[in-house]
Image (cartoon, helix red, strand yellow):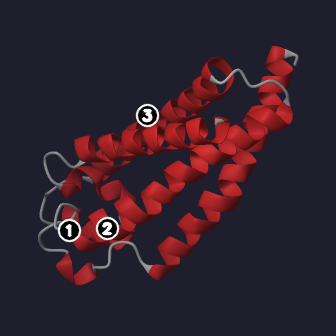
């Protein structure tokens, strides 16, 4: 039963990611151009759709919201709601939550939303599609597997020290 709860918590985190993205592109995909390649970013700066400063600012805001939000979310779910104690219990729960969110990000956001809808299309950059290249996808899959395991292990270790459990 616990695994179902943890999977649902991962879906919840994926929904939060989708909401952050929807808010980011609410006035057009240029609002999230920091997630695109430098070539697409430059193409948006040249006609004045945005500036390099605004791109950097949006990237910092996105990272701060997502990183801090993800960490807070998984810690609350795992240690407060689920009552995890010890390294292993915390590690596997965080890994499942983050992995489910990563799968939603790869398939629903990257492959479907960005890859097959016009919501993320920036006029004048269509020739630069796909926005998420095979190389980008490979990096995202690597970080989404190895990276999430490392983050889960680090957070579980920190929580063991913090909670002295």
Q: Secondary structure at mark 3?
A: helix
* Discs 1, 2 touching: Cβ within 8 Å: yes
Measured in 3D between alpha carbons, the distance from the residue under mark 1 to the one under mark 2, in whole angstroms, is 7 Å
Residue annotated with mark 1 = 117
User: Toward which corner of the image does residue 127 lie, by quadrant?
Assistant: bottom left
Q: Residue at x 34, y 47 (%)?
A: 18
State left or right for residue 107 relative to residue 146: left
State left or right for residue 66 relative to residue 96: left
Q: Is residue 152 above or below residue 126?
A: above
Q: Name the spot of residue 149 as percent of width and height, x first.
A: 72, 51
Residue annotated with mark 2 = 112
User: Toward which corner of the image does residue 58 lie, by quadrant?
Assistant: top left
Residue annotated with mark 3 = 65
Tell me which label, 3 or 1, sits earlier in the chain. 3
Measured in 3D between alpha carbons, the distance from the residue under mark 3 to the one under mark 2, in whole angstroms, is 23 Å
Q: Secondary structure at mark 1?
A: loop
Classed neighbour count for the residue bearing mark 2: other residues with Cα under 10 Å, few (<14), some (14–19), many (≥20):
few
Tell me which label, 3 or 2, sits earlier in the chain. 3
Q: Residue at x 44, y 38 (%)?
A: 12
Q: Secondary structure at mark 2?
A: helix
Mark 3 vs mark 1: in front: 1
Visible residue check, residue 103: yes
């Amino acid at each position: 039963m616990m695994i179902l709860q943890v999977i649902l918590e991962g879906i919840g985190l994926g929904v939060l990611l989708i909401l952050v993205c929807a808010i980011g592109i609410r006035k057009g995909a240029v609002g999230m151009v920091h997630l695109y390649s430098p070539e697409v970013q430059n193409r948006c700066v040249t006609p004045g759709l945005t500036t390099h400063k605004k791109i950097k600012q949006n990237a910092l805001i996105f990272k701060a919201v997502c990183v801090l939000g993800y960490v807070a979310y998984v810690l609350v779910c795992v240690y407060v709601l689920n009552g995890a104690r010890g390294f292993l219990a915390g590690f596997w729960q965080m890994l499942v939550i983050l992995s489910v969110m990563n799968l939603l990000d790869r398939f629903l956001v990257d492959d479907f939303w960005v890859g097959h809808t016009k919501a993320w299309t920036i006029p004048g950059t269509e020739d630069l599609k796909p926005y998420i290249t095979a190389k980008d996808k490979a990096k995202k899959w690597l970080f989404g597997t190895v990276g999430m395991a490392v983050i889960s292990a680090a957070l579980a270790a920190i929580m063991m020290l913090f909670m002295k459990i």
